[in-house]
Image: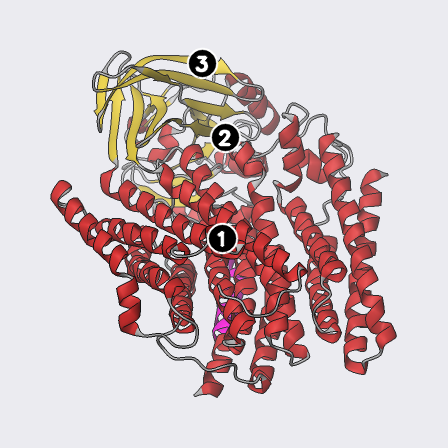
Amino acid sequence: MRRLLIWLPLGMFLVFLVVFAGGLIKPEGRVIPSKLVGKPMPAFALAPALPGKPGLSSAELANGQPHLVNVFASWCVPCIAEAPQLRQLAEAGVPVYGIAIRDRPEDLQRFIERNGDPFRAIGGDPNSSVQIALGSAGVPETFIVDGKGIIRKQHIGAINPEDVPGIMSALGDAK
Amino acid sequence: MIAEAGLAALWLAAALAALQLVLGWMGVSSQRTDLLAAVRPVAVVQAVLAGISFVTLIWLFVTVDLSVALVAANNASTKPLLYKFAGTWGNHEGSMLMWVTILAVAGGAVALFERRLNERTLIATLSAQAAIGLGFYAFLLFASNPFARLNPAPAEGQGLNPLLQDPGLAFHPPTLYLGYVGLSVAFSFAVGALVTRDVGAAFARAMRPWVLGAWILLTLGITAGSYWAYYELGWGGWWFWDPVENASLMPWLAATALLHSVTVLATREGLRAWTVMLAVVAFSMSMVGTFLVRSGILTSVHAFAVDPRRGTFILALLAIYIGGALALFGFRVGTVREGSRFDAVSREGSLVINNLLLSAILGIVLVGTLYPLVAEAVTGEKLSVGPPYFNSAAGPLALILVAIMAAGPIMRWRRDDLKATLTRLAGPMLLSALVLLAVVLLAPGIGILPLLGLVAAAGVGVASIAPLWGRNLRRTPLYIWGMVVAHLGIAVSMAGMAAESAFTRETLVAGRIGEEHRVGPYSVRLDDVQPIAGPNYTAIEGTVVARRGNGAPFTLHPQTRNFPSPQTETNEAAITTLLDGQLYVVVGRSDDEGRWQLRLWWKPFVTLIWLGGALVAFGGLLSLIGRVRREMRHAPPRETI
């Protein structure tokens, strides 16, 4: 009994190590998914983030066509990394809509000039209220929405080149 | 050049740590006195070199040398000087360098000042300390070099996380790190004593000031951290059972248990194996805490914020140190002679119960903190364990613990009589009964835990002073005063927690300018909201006029601050402290119709929570001074807690 007690702490520690090592090996699952996946887009109406470009409201998004809603900001570095993929998706005919978080028109203008403009419309969300309503925790995040305005999938973090096929097929499923 | 000098000092310090380990190892196993004698100077020089390296990094931050990657990522020339300075450790690499510097300096201090411990045990201790240091040096040099250059240098840095731009938080991490490192010294002492099979009173006395010092700093760190979360996050709560908070609470619980068991060992030669075990556990908890916070395994929201390489490195360090120490414990503890015997009803007995309860609470917190990880590993589902679990599982044990705390100090060593003990406790028990009656009559409907909390606080408050009864107060040793003050502090904190959870009033409204709202005994009116500009942020500031009954009105200025780099919003709650509590006001965003979010709290006696924490730390400090003075006077070994 005493023998067992002496080695018990080491045993417990080994279990702890295995669990932690497991947690480190697969880091991709470590995200907080939005509770809204499978539910309709929350209602919102955002003013245009850029002069000369339309703003965004939830009513427009239930337009019978699957599309992407990209939550981004000009001050966000990973957003620069995902810009080529968004352009590629837009060129393939995917409707891409943007929600610019806590941004200023002049910064956004510069961001678009530098990284291209895949967006059909960009709503400005100066105080993150729509972002919070969406259950999004940071930038960038992308929501795949079907034609009825139901959120089908949430992509957290930048869209990397290897993510594009998955997003295309998810859009196909959302038809 | 300066950055390179810092890096060179770091490499040299690492080399000396390796030398310290090897010399110590060879000296202890071969008993060669020349080798043993060489270890102390090496430890001191290692401390000096690590110190130079850290001071270099501070210099780079204060002068905003943007050609250093770490400075560019965490500093900005517009920042106030205090935060340039504190920015040194407000980031991963800098905080790790601070960790290893404190570790080396503590090792140097042991080498310089510890003279009463058996030489071989002391050198084994210094070797263990060098081994811990080596792991962290390797971590810094191979996985997170703080002196890495950035080419080309940017024109401006990215700043420090605005949540951390607070004087309290600038000094919060160093306090906790000093505490963690104090526990690492206790751990090294335990390893040293196991290596030389020298677990006895001398070892306990050598270790005790370090445990006490670590415990004081952890107490201060946790108290300050709790107050920071309370006023900075703007959520009105003071403890959230968040993994980061638990990361500092777990070593504190283990250190509290260790502090009590080490005194039994120093005084009565009892609880030998248990004390060694606790020293290992306490340091393990500070390492686990560091791992949880640093690897991002629990707190990260986005996958790209995680750094698995660093996580893996710390995990390897954990495996080597803790696994190694526990294995050493398993092999060696059988050869540790059993200590002195005692009856179940005795001061030792009450301290054993204290230790078991603290360990059980530690287990509850550990399980609650790790459960989400385990659950995710097994089922793949994300979940979180919240306050309901922690409060209902740990709360009752904490209540029993404070009841034991009332009884322990008035019991005799070795053997006591239960009836006599209860007679001595008659006063506190009577007072508790009166408080119970009063609270039930005056505040019906109060929850059971807050009710018992108030009752226990009253009883323990009185009982904690009992050891002073009938003593000549001027000749009472300082460490007795320390114990009395620390126990009183626990009672004060407990009263604050119970009062806050039972009597807090909360009002959340969206209000227009000029509207009156009520919270508790106050009427509160939002008079104005204006934009203002700070040194490196913009903010909106509300002007809120509050008034209690027909009393004089007073004005509060809550702010919501917006920092541009990195883009962050913080709430600066406006808090008015009154004798019987705090009025806590937060102004949030406005909606489209010109209404402002107002969050108002009236929190009776909430300040007692932190006042109690400060008292606990102050009691610890009195004890530490008392113990150190006594050791220096070479007093006879008979002593009491």
Amino acid on which disc 3 is placed: Pro
Amino acid on which disc 1 is placed: Gly
Does the CB distance between marks 3 and 1 fall below 8 Å?
A: no
Chain at tag 3: B
Q: Which residue position is annotated with label 2?
A: B568
Q: Is residue A8 left or right of residue B157?
A: left
Q: Is residue B286 left or right of residue B77?
A: left
Disc 1 on helix, strand or loop? helix
Amino acid on which disc 2 is placed: Thr
Report crowding for label 2: few under 14, some 14 to 19, many 20 or more residues within 10 A (C-alpha). Answer: some
Question: Which segment is the magenta one?
Answer: A12-27
Chain at tag 2: B
Whether callout 3 and callout 1 share a subunit is answered yes
Disc 2 on helix, strand or loop? strand
Does the CB distance between marks 2 and 3 fall below 8 Å?
A: no
Disc 3 on helix, strand or loop? strand
User: Is residue B152 or residue B145 the one in the foreground?
Assistant: B145
Q: Which residue position is annotated with label 3?
A: B531
| Residue occupying image coordinates x 42% and y 22% | B559
Query: Where does the N terminus of chain B fall, quadrant-wise?
Result: top right
Reading the chain from its start, which is encountered first: label 3 or label 1? 1
Q: Which mark is residue B482?
A: 1
Residue B491 in the image: state x and y as whole percent.
35, 50
**How far apart in space, not on screen, are marks 2 and 3 (Cα)?**
16 Å
How many discs mark residues in the rendered view?
3
